[in-house]
Amino acid sequence: MRDNQLVGYGLIVGLNGTGDKKGTEFTIRSFTSMLTKMGIAVDPALVSVKNVAAVMVTANLPPFMKKGSHLDVTISSIGDASSLQGGTLLQTPLKGANQTVYAVAQGPVSLGGYIGGGGGDSVQKNHATVGRISGGAIVEREVDLEFNLRKDIKITLRQQDFTTAVRLAEIINDSLNEKLAYPEDSGTVVLTIPEEYQSRVVELVASIENLDIQVDAPAKVVLNERTGTVVMGENVRISTIAISHGNLTIQVKTQIKVSQPGPFSKGETIVVPEREVSVDEQKARLILLQSGVTVDEVVRALNSVGVTPRDLIAILQAIKVAGALHAELEII
């Protein structure tokens, strides 16, 4: 079972002059078209939309949602509105990928931020052009699943792993005393519905949810070079390797000096930049890591020589290239 994504195009009204500008053609057309459907004829050339903003409305429709249920929706400006603060979303149909309307959204927008200013100064908190309406969409059409009529079900693992898939199939078979489940691949286990659970699939799934299984965590190292963050799982292992990492720092200082000629002379005032370049290379220390060391031992060894998180990123990348890091290296 999975969520279905819904999307719709709508208008937000009631803004305090922070809506789309006059040149936003699609907002003007949408607004005049809406008024025309209400029996109000207007000239688009005379319409001002500074209190109106065109937005995209998105939501996720979970499985088994019934008619009349409420969904949270996210509203995002697609024009040049500066803020959606204080606005109200008008009735907006939300469609699935098959262009069928499954829900309708409407209501006041909550931002969790603001933007304001005056006299050339401005202040902004959080993002003022994206907001939410909690429970702002009403489900009008259900996704027909016929869950209890299924002859088999496929269980999808959140983290794909061959070992975990095999273990799950074995545990299900042991609990049912029949070999009805088998791993289709690293992320899917197929289960044939037993005779006693025909038309009672919900009960079967509930019993499977309560089974205990030991998940096989993959060995992975995640690096974020922008923030210097390094995350390593306990299964990460490193072969015997020697590491030498030195720091080279180059600093350039620029001082601006002014050459001022004497009074009543024909000289010119000249701005002269003076640059001072300094190079500092720290001595590198050699670290020897034995085969099979754990993450804790690696961190302790590197911390002992004052390695920073950004240095650690470079070191781990070099260890991976050397073939000594037995883990997947992911850079985000």
Image (tube, helix red, strand yellow):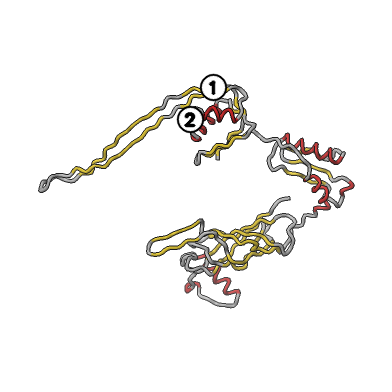
- In the figure, is residue 114 to the left or right of 280? right
Name the residue at 65% across, 63% down: 137
The number of numbered discs placed on residues in the rendered structure image is: 2
- In the figure, is residue 265 to the left or right of 1? left
Q: Which mark is residue 306?
A: 2
Q: Which x, y percent locates residue 189? A: 77, 41
Name the residue at 57% across, 77% down: 40
Q: Which x, y percent locates residue 127? A: 51, 56
Task: Give the Cα separation between the discs numbered 2 and 1.
Answer: 15 Å
Name the residue at 80% across, 55% down: 146
Residue furthest toward the right? 196
Earlier in the chain: of badge 2 and badge 1, it is 1
Label 2 crowd bin: few (<14), some (14–19), many (20+), radius 10 Å: few
Q: Amino acid at mark 2?
A: Gly
59 over 304 or under it: above or below: below
Q: Nearer the viewer, residue 85 or 191?
A: 85
Q: Quadrant where the C terminus lies?
A: top right
- In the figure, is residue 236 to the left or right of 80? right
Label 1 crowd bin: few (<14), some (14–19), many (20+), radius 10 Å: few
Q: Which mark is residue 101?
A: none
Q: Which x, y percent locates residue 79? A: 51, 61
Q: Secondary structure at mark 2?
A: loop
- In the figure, is residue 46 to the left or right of 193? left
Q: Amino acid at mark 1?
A: Leu
> From the viewer's perspective, is the residue at label 2 or at label 1 nearer?
2
273 over 78 or under it: above or below: above
Q: Which mark is residue 288?
A: 1
Q: Secondary structure at mark 1?
A: strand
